[in-house]
Image (cartoon, grey):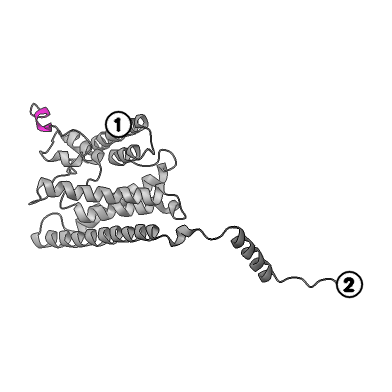
Amino acid sequence: MDSPAAPVPAAAQLETVTSRLQSNHPPSPVANCPFVDAIAAVGEFLGTFLFFCTAYIATQAAKNSAAEGTSESVVLLLYISLAFALSLTANVWLFYRVSGGLFNPALTLAFVLLRLMTPAKGALLAASQLLAGIAAAGVAKALVPNYNLAVQTTLGEGVTPVQGFFIEFFLTAELALAVFMIAVEKHRATHMAPLVIGAALGVGHLVGASLTGASMNPARSLGPAVVNLSFASEHWIYCQFSLNVDCEKYTDGF
């Protein structure tokens, strides 16, 4: 009578299964494709550029504010940045699975252009976001006693409209990248998307609060302007997706 065969160690069994899988499904040649490496290099360039560029500008903006002794002090800058970052983080987390938590017509337009959303839905969400911005500004003005609503986004002293346009352009682009890279592109860090998106907005405020008001959102700029009935001549830089109109003529009679 033959003796029973000795049990095969688990490690040996795993090695056998792995070798069989590799023989039937060899590694994809894409893993060593130069094109993939080139994409990784471009991604590293863009990420490093945005990281250092925003950090440098934020540092200079804080130094300028401290040197000039304006009301835009470093403490106030940090407070505003933290307020916007935490507010966005909390609300994106609340509404992320309800509506996507965009809260931004510029991001909505990006979703439509990338065919992640139908134009009809995009128009509906954008209108809702703009109206919400106006309503929020109205409620804020009503609830804050004895103060005017001083939250409009305007260009800082010495900042030209062209500079303001590109500052807003780059800050909005980084916010959009945070949304697409973390929330839209699904991976293990997707559940942390609200934190990353809030952090991107906070960095944007550190960089641009004293330069352009760090809008990064047409709805954020439109609401206070409508409630205060005050449209600056450079307001168009905060509405880059819309028609450039002379808004001042609509408020001359007020």
Label 2 belongs to which residue?
2
* Residue at x 29%, y 60% (from the top left corner): 45
* Residue at x 14%, y 32% (from the top left corner): 245
Q: Quadrant of the C terminus?
A: top left
Label 1 belongs to which residue?
127
Q: Secondary structure at mark 2?
A: loop
Would residue 149 be found to the left or right of residue 15 on screen?
left
Number of the label disc, if any, that sits on residue 119: none
| Residue range highlighted in magenta | 246-252
* Residue at x 38%, y 57% (from the top left corner): 35
Would residue 210 be found to the left or right of residue 137 on screen?
left
Indicate the amino acid at tag 2: Asp
* Residue at x 14%, y 63% (from the top left corner): 63
| Residue farthest right in this picture | 1
Q: Along the line of sight, which residue is nearer the eye, 13 or 247? A: 13
| Residue farthest top in this picture | 253
Indicate the amino acid at tag 1: Ala
Which quarter of the figure has residue 152? top left
Q: Mark 1 to mark 2: distance in Å?
A: 81 Å
Q: Position of residue 69 (x, y in %)?
A: 10, 59
- The mark nearer the N terminus, 1 or 2, is 2
Question: Is 9 drawn above or below residue 39 in the view shown?
Answer: below
Q: Position of residue 230 (x, y in %)?
A: 13, 35
Q: Is residue 82 visible?
A: no
